Image (cartoon, coloured by chain):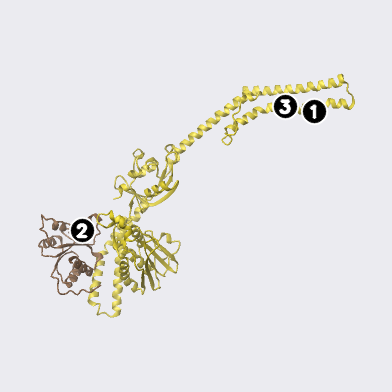
Chain colours: A brown, B yellow
Amino acid sequence: MEPINNTQGTGKKVLCIEDEHFISELYTRALTKAGYAVDVQMDGQLGLASAQSDKYDIILLDLMIPTITGIEVLRTLRDTAKTPKLHAKIIITTNLEQRDEVKTDIEKQADGYLVKAEITPRELVEFLSHLEA
Amino acid sequence: MDYLQKFTSQIRNRLFLLLLINNVLIVADWYVVDRVVKLTGWWSLIALLAVPVLTFSILPWLSTRALVQPTKLIWQAILHLAPATANSVAAPKAEQTHIGRELVANLVSQLYQLASVVDEVERTSQKSSQDLHTNFLASALPLPFIVLDKNESIVFVNDLACHYIKRESSDLIGQNIYTMLDMSFASNKTFESWLSDAKQNSVTADQAWERVRLGLADEQNTLQFDLAAHYNKGNTLGYETVLVLFDHTEQYSQDDQAVSFVALAVHELRTPLTLLRGYIEVFDEELGDKLTPELKAFMGKMNAAAESLASFVDNILNVAKIEDNQLTLQLHEEAWPSIVDNVVQDMSLRAGVRGIALKTEIAKDLPPVGVDRYSIYEVLANLIDNAIKYSRDTKEIFITTKLNDNGLVETSVKDFGLGIETSILPHIFDKFYRNHRNRSQIGGTGLGLYLSKSIIDAHGGQIWVNSKVDEGSTFTFTVQPFSSLAAEQKNSDNGDITRGAHGWIKNHSLYRG
C-alpha cells in the first residue's frame, strides 16, 4: 500500500454520521491526514441537521444510529420536498448485511455503499479519492 | 356322483364281459380240442394253451385304450389350461371316448370353470396391485409417496404424502407437480432437469437428492427432505414417475439454525474487529519505520491474526447468506493474474508468520475470466488459508494457474503437509465437515470448503481435490473465460451476469426469479 502523502489539504469537507466513537476517531484521523476537514455527528437527528446545511462535499452515513436511522436520514436528504438538492456525495457505511433488494434500494439513493468490516481507514481514503475522480 | 357310478358300472360291465368272453373262449377251445378234433398228447396241450395265451395278451391290449381314454382326455384338458402348454394342446372332445363320456364331459367342464375362476382371481389381484388407489402397500407405505403420469401431472398421492404436504388428495390429483410442489434443490441438478433428461435419454432412471426444500402453502413452514425418484418410460398404467420423500426437516433446520446462530454471534465480532484492524493500521503508519525488527514482526503477526479472524467472520456470514439465498454474484470481465496476485499478496502476510513461502506460477496469455471478484477472492484465500493451516512444518505452497484442455482457467493450490485421508475425501466439501483427526490441532469451522464449492458452482466452475496422507493436498478449481459467458451477458440488462450463489435453486422455471 502506498503511504498517504497528501498533507496539503484537499479543502474538501466530510461529515461523518457515526455513533461508534472509535470508528469515527479512526476515520477522522485517516481523513484529516489525507487533507479532508471532518465533522462528526453521533446521532441521526444532529447528523441530518448538519447534512441539510449543505456545507459538505462528502457525507459518511452509518445506518445504525440513534434517534433517526440512517435509512430515514438518507430518504429525507434525497426527498426534494424536505431537503434542497445537496451537492454532497452520500456514502453509506454499515456493518449490517442488507438483503439484496434493500441494498439495491439504498444504492440507488446513495453514491456509495461500504461495509465497515471490509475496509480499513486507509482503504476508505482510497475509496473517497476514486469517488472524486 | 351319478357320472362316476355310471363310469364304474361301465368299467365293471366291460371287465365282466371281457372275462366272460375269455372264459367262453377257453371252454370253447377245450370243447373243440377234446371233442371235435380229438387231439392227444403234446398237440392237445399246445392247442389248449394257445387260446388263453392269445386272449390274455390281446384283450388287455385292446381294452386298455378304451379304459385309459377318459383319463387321457382329462389330462389333455389340464394341459390345455396350463399356461405353459396352452398353445400346443387342443381342447379335448368328450365324444372321443365311449366309456365315461358323461364323466369326462362333466369333469372337463368343471376344470374349465375352475380355470376361469383362477383367471378372474389373477386378473383382480393384478388389477389391485397395479391400481395404486386400491393397493394396500402404496397407501400404507410409511413414507410420503407421489406418482406422476407422462405429463408430470399427479395421478396418485398416498395418505402420508397428503398429510406431509398438508394438502387434500383431491386438490393434488390431476395437477401439475411443479405448480403443486414448490421444491428447491441444493444444486442446479434439480428434479425437473433430471426428469427432462431421463425422458429424453432413458427408459428407466433413478435419482436421489439431499436437502430438498419445500415451502408449504401457508408460507410459514418449510419442509426439508431427501427425495428419491424412479422414472419408467411409458408405464402401461400411466405411472411414469414415482417420488418418495424422506423427511429430515428437524435435522436440517437444526443445521440451519446452527448457521444462523453462529452468524448472529459472529456478526457481533465485526465492529471490534474493524477497530482492531483500524488501530493496527494506525500503529503501522505511525511506528512502521521506528520499530525494531522484532517488534515489527510482532506487529505483522498481530495484523495477520486480525486478518485471519476477519476472513473467518466473513466466511461464516457468507455461509449464512448462502443458506438464506442472499449471496448473489456479479460476474464481470476480470484479468485473472491480477486477482491471483492480489490474493497471494494479501495471504503472504499470514503465510510469512509461519515461515511459509507462497510461490505462484501463472501461465501467460490467460483469457479474461468471468468472475465475481470478491467471492472468487474468498475461494482462493480459503484454499491458501487451508494450505497454510495444514502445511505443518513444510515451508512451501504452490499456486499455479493455466488454461486447461477444456478451455477453462484452472487454478491449483498445492501444499506438502498433512494430506487428507481417503475416507474423508468425499465429504471434504460438505458443510461443517472437517478432518476429525485434526479437529483439536487446527482451527477452522469446516465451512470454508463448503463456501468455496458453493461459490465455484455459482460461477459454473468445478472444484476438486487430490490428496495423500503425509504428502499434502492439491485443491483445484476452474472458472470460465469471460468470452464463454458472453452469450449469457447479452440477455442481461446491465451488462453484468447475476448468479445466485447456489443456495437453493428453484425447481421450475415458473419460480425462477
Side of B297 where B101 appears, left or right = right
- Residue situated in front as seen by the camera: A21 or B20: B20
Give residue B62's mark: 3
Label 3 – label 2 distance at C-alpha: 112 Å
Label 3 – label 1 distance at C-alpha: 14 Å
Percent x, y for residue B422? Answer: 45, 62
Q: Which residue is mark 1?
A: B53
Residue projecting furthest to the top: B36
Residue at 36% of width from left, 72% of height from top? Answer: B359
Q: The disc numbered 3 marks a residue on which chain?
A: B
Q: Label 2 amino acid?
A: Glu
Q: The disc numbered 2 marks a residue on which chain?
A: A
Percent x, y for residue A69? Answer: 17, 58
Above-or-below relation of B127 to B366 = above
Q: Which residue is mark 2?
A: A107
**N-terminal of the two: label 3 or label 1?**
1
Labels 3, 2: one chain:
no
Q: Are marks 3 and 1 in contact (CB under 8 Å)?
A: no
Q: Quadrant of residue B48?
A: top right
